[in-house]
Amino acid sequence: MGKPILGMGCGKDMSSSLPVQEEGGQTVTAMLRAASWTFRGLHCTSVPFSGRINSKRADRSCPLAEKVAVITGSTKGIGFAITQRLAQDGAHVVVSSRKQQNVDRAVAALQGEGLSVTGTVCHVGKAEDRERLVATALENYGGIDFLVCVAGVNPLVGSTLGASEQVWDKILNVNVKAPALLLSQLLPYMEKSGGSSVVLVSSMVAYVPVPKLGVYNTSKTALLGLCKSLAVELASKGIRVNCLVPGIIKTDFIQVEKTLPYLLPDLNEIYGLQWFGEPEECVGIVSFLCSSDASYITRENIVVAGYSPKL
Ligand code: NAP
């Protein structure tokens, strides 16, 4: 995978986009970052230090500067949009999904925008892929601050009780177990970071089950529980865990025009806002949840659906 280009999303100077040299198997970005671990935040923009102290506005425009995010299922749809936003907000981002060509395409597109991203193949259900994802982040950027678990699958439209054991295993493995297992692999590094944040991606079906998606509905409800449990377990380590709960978002996953009329007739009569969401409408909240503005927010499920099923 191509070398990372330091981010230009927050108005960094061009010198930071020079090609990165290899030295002893580690990129210069990773070495610089590791060396400055204890002084993180002091060198996070190209603006001189004294200038940064005086300019709160500059920091606000780049809230995730020099942070490192690992994002699963991020080569298209909601995950790609989140990657783009976190990188625009200053983070170095590791893009991942199952297919190499999707990773290559996403990384090329984002690097073409001058954003600091690298990528690797990671099927979240495979332990060796998760290990490679962790290694990619460490080799390229020297640490990990944020994990955003977007990857999710639904291979079945049909009866819950008619679902095979293989279908149950696949959906629960990818949607529920994988985020927990990946986080356990990242934990030693996120603990060191200070101010780490995890964002899980559930779905509105967790609150409003959709007919014929029973196994998927169940997995997304389980994610709300996983968020609560992990938030409690990791609070003492200073790691916050929250959950994005999207409604219907126009991506290949949902195929709005083809699928929805069969699953949810009269949908627009149910929803408060009379449109289906775009992936970009999910990203601001994820950036916020990663940022220090959300430093006192954990164990929260946040619905982005045009309406809310909560009290
Ligand atoms: P999408 O456009 O189909 O994108 C899915 C992404 O995940 C792709 O990058 C895909 O790339 C990757 N992926 C799929 N299986 C994977 C696996 N096992 N391991 C790693 N990566 C995998 O889907 P989306 O609509 O953005 O959905 C993303 C998440 O949002 C899912 O968890 C979904 O449940 C949730 N969600 C979506 C909606 C919606 O209306 N779209 C609503 C609520 C919740 P590869 O093919 O290369 O792996």
Image (cartoon, rainbow, N blue to C red):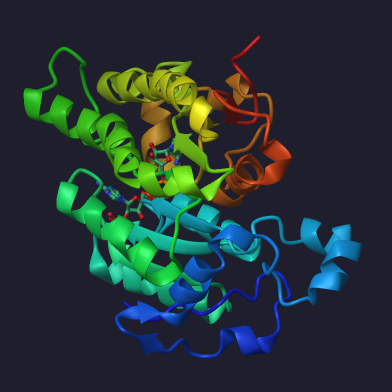
Q: Is residue 280 above or below residue 200?
A: below
Q: Work out which quarter of the rendered image holds the N terminus and state it.
A: bottom left
Q: Position of residue 5 (x, y in %)?
A: 51, 80
Residue 105 in view here: yes
Residue at position x 57%, y 47% from top?
278
Q: Is residue 8 above or below residue 223?
A: below
Q: Is residue 35 above or below residue 311?
A: below
Residue at position x 42%, y 19% from top?
229
Q: Nearer the viewer, residue 159 or 100?
A: 100
The quarter of the displayed image where residue 104 is located: bottom left
Q: Nearer the viewer, residue 181 or 25?
A: 25
Q: Position of residue 132 (x, y in %)?
A: 24, 60
The quarter of the displayed image where residue 299 is located: top right
Q: Work out which quarter of the rendered image holds the C terminus and state it.
A: top right
User: Residue at the right extreme?
Assistant: 54
Q: Is residue 122 left or right of residue 40?
A: left
